[in-house]
Image: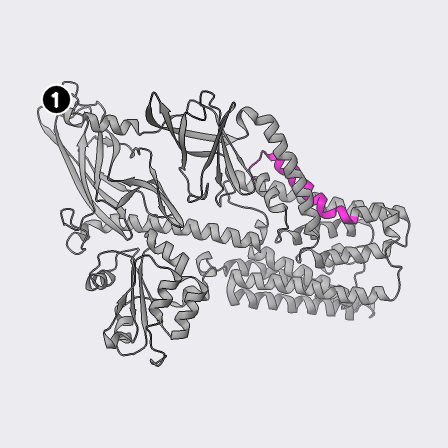
Amino acid sequence: MSVLSTVSQIAAKRVSRWLIGLAIALLLWIGLGWGDSAVWANPSAPENRVQASLVSEVTSIQPGTSMWVALHLKIREGWHVYWQNPGDSGAAPIVRWSLPEGFRAGELVYPYPERLPVPPLMNFGYKDEVYYLVKITPAANVPTGQSVTLRAEGEILVCKVECVPEPKSVSLTLPVTAEPPAQDPAMAAAFTRVRQALPQPSPWSVSFAVEETTLRLRVAVTNLSKGQVRAVEFFPYQDGVMENAADQAWTIDSDGLTLTVKRGYRDDLTTVDGVLVLQEQLDGQTITQAFDIRAVPGGGTATSSTSLALIGKTLLLALLGGVVLNLMPCVFPVLSLKALTIAQQAQRSPRQARIGGLAFTAGVLVSFALLAAALLLLRSLGQQVGWGFQLQSPGFVLIMAYVLFAVGLSLSGAFTIGASIMGLGSGLTARPGYSGEFFTGMLTTVMATPCTAPFMATAVSVALVQPPGVAIAVLLVLGLGLALPYLLISITPAVRRWLPKPGAWMEVLQQFLAFPIYGAAAWLVWVLTQQTGTNGLAIALTGLVLISFAAWLHQKTQLSRQVWRRVGMVGSLATLVLAVTLTPLVNQNAVPPDQRNATPQVSAWQPYSAQQVASLQQSNQPVFFNFTAAWCVTCLVNDRVALSQPEVIAAFQAKGVRLIKADWTNRDPDITQALSRYGHSGVPLYVLYPSGLSQGRFQILPKMLTPAIVQEALATVPNSVTRR
């Protein structure tokens, strides 16, 4: 469950990031149409937080000769714009060019950013002013002796306490001459300054290592001293590489610079790319340099010793994690079968007990090897998978529920297995001889994958970013840890002597052990319901009824004449096939992740609409409006630290407050007009009507919320207002 929860949070964050980009793209697409309607749509309006212009490094254009221009933003005091990776929130600028035929524009080139803390988040961007460089390549056949105009339209997200997207239209006209372009003296200093802030290729090799909670970058630079370096900062190009708001600790020794940061949610790092900013004291001056780095797994100068130590530690953690995994609730029901088998074998020959333990261990190791191979194969194909990935398939979950339900029926005595293939998984695990031990080991592995034991999370995380050989070794050791207690019992006579002797109690134990198996099957059905909704639940229950009928029919005809035994066999198999054919149906009913992750807390917020407001005008019920947007950093902070807190939700419910969320992520004229009525042109905005909209009295809350601020505002809501 923990693995499924982590994948859902990563997917939610990626979906959130995708929505931010989509929102900006939509605004760009329709931005021209906003020019007459939105408060911030006019670039020359006094509300603008950013002044944009297009400037050139040269005074003319030579056909076919590349030149540099820059999108220059002068930012109002207290506001900021964003780097290519905006950090925990925000959005990078988007520029769309309108160039003469044959002209080409490159990508934006970003100077190194600065950290912009908005506790508990951290953004990356710029204050005061910034030049985004762009390389323009004119057409080789553009006629000389005339002027051409370069035009661009941009979408700039500018934030302070609130965030406002500002569309910009800029242009630049330059003459076309046959001579090489001359540098514009008026712009020389600005372009020199911004080039000094551009990341340079790193002259050093850089490696990284992922540990339990940290990401460690090792820069093999040997000419640094502790007194020389004043500050070190790292800005990753990708989200999820590190916790952006966490402190960045750095040390310098004879082997180079080591930067340690808190690792992010990504567990699939093959390289770590970003900008390393060094602030040094040289010749009495403070010099800041930025380097474009690409770190690869390993330890740089200390690669061998560090990697071996890391691998050794990982293997030890994997072994301990495998042993502890036996105690997890998803494993224990299946291993109860093994405990029963050991009790039976304890009274037989030592040789049979040893081989049985080895067969069980082999089943565990083979299935762990198959699991590791599948993981590595899928990851090489670009799939984001992790421990327990197979349970993301509703069809697989349904099959496992079938198998465990059949095992439970067998333990309860609903049917017994002879030489038939009846019972699928239970048939495999209950087969006489060592094959039953082997398949019990495989079933144990499958059932272990939803659980995460102490120690193993770190081991698996490290394994998935290591070379294939190391990854497979770690997972095999994890499997060995899982099988180790039973292997020791099987091969150690002194331990076996502690086991109780066979007797009538074994039948009682066998029937009792069916219930944890039923519990595991019920849990899998619950998981399936989360994945597929009530349609999947109906399919699963239908399949379980069919399996019950197959078991009854098989057992009922066992003592009949041969012809009826054959009829029972065919009927049971046909019923089982029918149950299995239901499996594809659950995949077709899979619920999208965003709907699966919806919580009652989220559903308490109702979407803003003119009809909703008109309805509220007729009521005295208190109302709280949350004007927000997915790209608004302050909105996200307030949602996390205040509005989503249990005590705040409880306070809203106690006062019977209607919660209305006005999502301004995409264009919504109704929300824009509502903001304007409250004298605001951006989000966030929080408005509380203590006695309902019909009374007209409202309170605007601060832009930075805390639970105490919201609860204090709710104290003004009378307890006697009408509830609905």
Q: Which residues are magenta?
A: 464-486
Quadrant hosting residue 196: top left
Q: Is residue 566 above or below residue 434?
A: below
Residue 232 at x, y percent in the picture:
41, 32
Q: Is residue 659 visible?
A: no
Does the magenta run of residues contain 472? Answer: yes
Residue 627 lies, in percent from the top left, at 30, 61
The residue drawn where x is 28% and y is 32% is 106
The answer to whether residue 83 is left or right of residue 679 is right
Please say whether residue 671 is visible from this viewpoint: yes
Q: Nearer the viewer, residue 548 or 613?
A: 613
The quadrant of the rendering that contains the C terminus is bottom left
Q: Residue at x 73, y 58 (%)?
A: 426
Q: Position of residue 61 (x, y in %)?
A: 16, 25
Residue that carries the numbered disc 1 in the rendered image: 177
Residue 68 position by quadrant: top left
Residue at the left extreme of this rendering: 145
**Residue 124 against residue 694 in the figure, above or below:** above
Front residue of 487 and 703: 703
> Given the image, on which type of amino acid does mark 1 rest?
Thr
- Tell me residue 568's x, y (percent): 75, 67
Local packing at callout 1 (Cα closer than 10 Å; few below 14, some 14-19, many 20+) is some
User: Considering the image in quadrants, where does the N terminus appear?
Assistant: bottom right
As for residue 450 lying within the magenta part, the answer is no
Picture residue at 44% right of the left edge, 30% below the top: 294
